[in-house]
Amino acid sequence: MKSKKIIKIITVALSVSSLSFFTSCASSPKADRETLFQVSLLQGLTFGDYYGSITAAQLKENGDIGLGTFDALDGEMIVLDGVIYKAKADGSVQVVADSEKIPFSNVSFFDADEKITLKNVTDIASLKNLLNQKVAEKGINRFYVVRIDGLFSKMNVRSEYSQKEPYKPLAKVLETDQTFFDYKDIQGTVVGLYCPPYMNSLNAVGWHLHFISADKKKGGHILDLNVSDAELALDCTDGFKMVLPDNKMFANFDLTIDQSEDIKKVETKD
């Protein structure tokens, strides 16, 4: 049973805050599988709210693919085929327990609407340009989840160390407490999420990409890559539901403050 203290689901349709809504999608066969489920706001995370508000078990009830992080900012999350993996700052990857707490995440149930073959995509900018072409074709105001399975001649990822209270803002954490890993000729899967422009107060706009190796031993937040030969599967997702954390820190944030520069810093290596 879900704790009333932990789970607070807002269902305001197409309001200014837009915490739960659906847009038209002719290709949506099952509405419950066509929803992006979000835990908290990325803007809350960037302020330093690393307190887990739902469990891994609860997250898996709402999706089988996605990304995020863990209580105390303990590594990068990759959700793939219904399993939640933690890519830690020491370079290791582990399957998390159902009791693990999660402060921020996005998950959905994956049903591929389109598949294409990728070869010799030289860097992350080129990949995002290709993905943005698909977004332009299908509609810039929808959500998209992708998985890219194959061989990557280059994969540059990062993770971060678990934090201790009092928590610092995420951009400050990444000045000292992130680690980088460079892999060559590695098989694995990229999990990606696209959020449309009107989500700029709730999440990072555009593409957010995480990686996990085929042997499930390496992974993290992607900073750069080179795709040698892979298959890209894309899922159009038109529903959105958010769960807000129930803690004093989040309740007192001034979320009207523009955090676009800090979000750019935490999403890229610049």
Image (cartoon, helix red, strand yellow):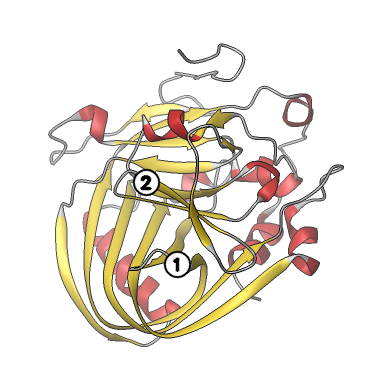
| Left or right: where 225 falls relative to 178 | left
- The residue shown at (61%, 56%) is 75
Query: Closer to the observer: label 1 or label 2?
Result: 1
Q: Is residue 162 visible?
A: yes
Q: Which of 145 and 103 is in front in this view?
A: 103
Amino acid type at image mark 2: Val
Taking 241 as reference, is 182 above or below it?
A: below
Which residue sits furthest right? 166
Dot 1: element: loop
Residue 146 found in image quarter? bottom left
Q: Which residue is the site of mark 2?
A: 83
Quarter of the figure with the C terminus: bottom right
Taking 155 as reference, is 6 above or below it?
A: above
| Left or right: where 177 falls relative to 206 | right
Q: Which residue is the site of mark 1?
A: 217
Amino acid type at image mark 1: Lys
Q: Nearer the viewer, residue 194 or 70?
A: 70
Question: Label 1 crowding class (10 Å Cα cut-off): few <14, some 14-19, many 20+?
Answer: some
Q: Which of marks 1 and 2 is nearer the N terminus?
A: 2
**Where is residue 62 drawn, in percent x and y?**
36, 32
- The residue shown at (74%, 25%) is 251
**Where is residue 28 drawn, in percent x and y?**
16, 37
- The residue shown at (20%, 38%) is 25
**Where is residue 115 drawn, in percent x and y?**
15, 63
| Left or right: where 211 falls relative to 257 | left
